[in-house]
Amino acid sequence: MKLPLLEYTILYFLGILWLNLLFTYIPDTETVKAFNSLFLSVGASFISATAIIFSIIIFTLQINNERLPHGMFKKISRDTRLLSSFIMAVILSVLITICSLISDTSTIFYVIQISITFILLILCCFIYSYTRALKLINPIYQLEAIVKSTREDLLSWDKAFKKTKNKNNNNDIAKFEYFRQHPYWIDSARQGIVYCNAYSRRLIEQNDYETSERALKSIIDINIEYIEVKGKTFIRREPSSDAMTSNDKLIEDTLEEIRQNIQNALSTNDERFIISNFVTLKELHYIYSNINYINNHGDRFASNLASQYLIDGLENSISHNIPNVLLSGIRLLSDVAKKDILDFESNKIGGITHIITRLACEGMIDKELLPITKCSLDELSTITIQLLFSKEHDTNYINEEMNKHLFTIGKTEITSLHPSYSYSYSYSYFENTYYTKVSDKLIKFVNSLSNEELTNDKKIYTKKIIENIEKWSDSICHENGELFELALTNNSDVAPQLVNFISNISKCLMKLSTLEIVDGKLSSKLEKNALWLISIFTFIKEDENVINLLEMHNFTDTIFELAVCAYSYNLIDITVEIRDILLSCGFRGQKVNDQNRILAKALGSSIYINTLLDKSCDDLIAVIKIELNKHDLTNEIKTTATNDLQNIFNIYPSFNLSIEKSLNSLEDREELMNYINSISELIVNQDRKNKCQI
């Protein structure tokens, strides 16, 4: 238990008081001589003890520091505090011995008092030497010493520049020129980074991962100090710039040290050390992203190089069968991408999305890597959302790249179905991770606009987000159309997932087009994109398996809800278009499978939509005639369709479909029956007409 200094002092003076009382009873000079002999022996013993303890501590330092970098070992071996402590102990021991020569009875009390004080001080020196030696062999202290020494050296150069700063009006240019004329000013920092990394590698050999991570953190600290001292003297790299001018030797050395760490760790499959270096690269990317540059054009050389090293490290890890490293790398790369988006540098994340896409596809092929696929899709959805809500001026290019990557993932999932996978197990990741997360975020955003009063600044930002959504929705039409076709061809569960995704996005686009802050031009684009997305549904093929798959997920009901949604936003043209799409899908579906009553549901839906639009029955009849002429339905199918239409109020009572609810909500049953009878008669008459022609 440690006592405060005040208590030590009190104990000392109590001891002196006791000695004072004791020496009042000193009888003769023989006792004085005895005390002299005693202190002579104690002094000599302490001199010997000092030498022995000093040797032991030096030996301990040497054993613990034998693998230190030469410069650091030299610095620790010359520790002035430790050496001063031993010198002080020797001097005090000699003084005790000298005090033994004093034999004057009148002063013996003071001599003894001084000797005891020296003894206590010698013991304090021993204790201090012991604790100081323990501190010196502590790697944490050694790392702190390296960082401190590097900081002091860098600040000394900064102070040296400030003494000359008045020679040039432009302080940044003057500083740049000063450092360019003294390239060796970073030597101590470069040496510090080498030392810290040497600690990191040595500690890994001892399985001391926590301290190794602290060594990597020291590398980051040195870079922070370096960037702060250098200030706004960094140069962006332009295509025509001199590489020697735009590059930074310290940053290059730092990243090269980390790259070598990753390579060494991969050779031994040391997952924790790999992850630690991945984290270091991410932190360095963050630091380098905040660098102030003299010029405003060109690439951010430092942050781009850090992210590229992280991409390369993750790519090299793929073949080593280390899922934990891949999962950590994906999340770290996603953080890097989000930082670039916040910095309006989204055009630099193409390599990140590419490697994440590759890893997502790996999980589609190898069942054991499915968690990596889920993580990849989750991070891609986060990046997509970040892009949509970015204030950056133009994100078209990266959005197009993202859509191509997602098409690649979807195609791989569809075409690489493992025989042991079930549909629900395999494809739930795509649905629950990417499609659901993106659509839910957009739905939440759209709904929030209805209940929120926007300030002028908020209106500008909201309109920017809506413009991003419009451009993104325009770019997803082509890839999602191809993916839908491919999913239908392979009878894949991705098809109904795409139906739900397209439906949710289309509803969001239609609602956004009606907002007051959206001008006419933007509103037209949103409506056009919504219609283009819905038109993807016309790609369905006349295949029984495809129709069964879609109807299991209420495909007809989904299209009907889109038409009702469009009407609720007073988008009449879109409502009519969706009605026609609904009829087209109904005829195609009924032609190959009449068990799902697809045509009857499509006809019932079109009747309800026509009633909402307040259009005449003849208008709907004309559209149905066109579809009848396109599809050569058998008499059996037509009979089934007309019977189902007559029973439209209760086709699937257990399914509780929106179509049935909507038709039952109509009050004018006479008009509804007129629709049903007219359509049924049209189908029957066409049947008779075909017979007459034959």
Image (spheres, helix red, strand yellow):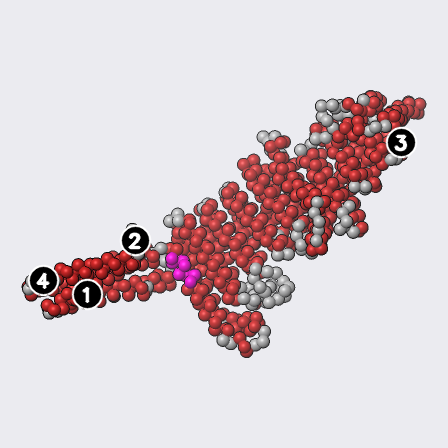
Question: Residue 2 — which label?
Answer: 2
Q: As drawn, which residue projects farthest toward the bottom?
A: 167
Q: How would you classify the magenta stretch by its main secondary structure? A: helix
Instruction: Name the side, left or right, on which 637 lies relative to 471.
Output: right
What SS does tag 1 mark?
helix
Q: Residues within 10 Å of mark 2 (few under 14, many from 20)?
A: few
Q: Report, in whole angstroms, how far the alpha carbon at label 4 lies from the one at label 1.
A: 18 Å
Going 57% across and 50% down the picture, which residue do you hit?
335
CA gap, disc 2 to disc 3? 98 Å
Q: CA distance from mark 4 to mark 3?
A: 133 Å
Amino acid marked by disc 1? Ile
From the image, tell me which residue sits under label 3. 617
Q: Which residues are magenta?
A: 141-148
Q: Identify the disc placed on residue 114.
A: 1
Tell me the mark number nearer the camera, choosing from 3 and 1. Answer: 1
Disc on the earlier residue, 2 or 3: 2
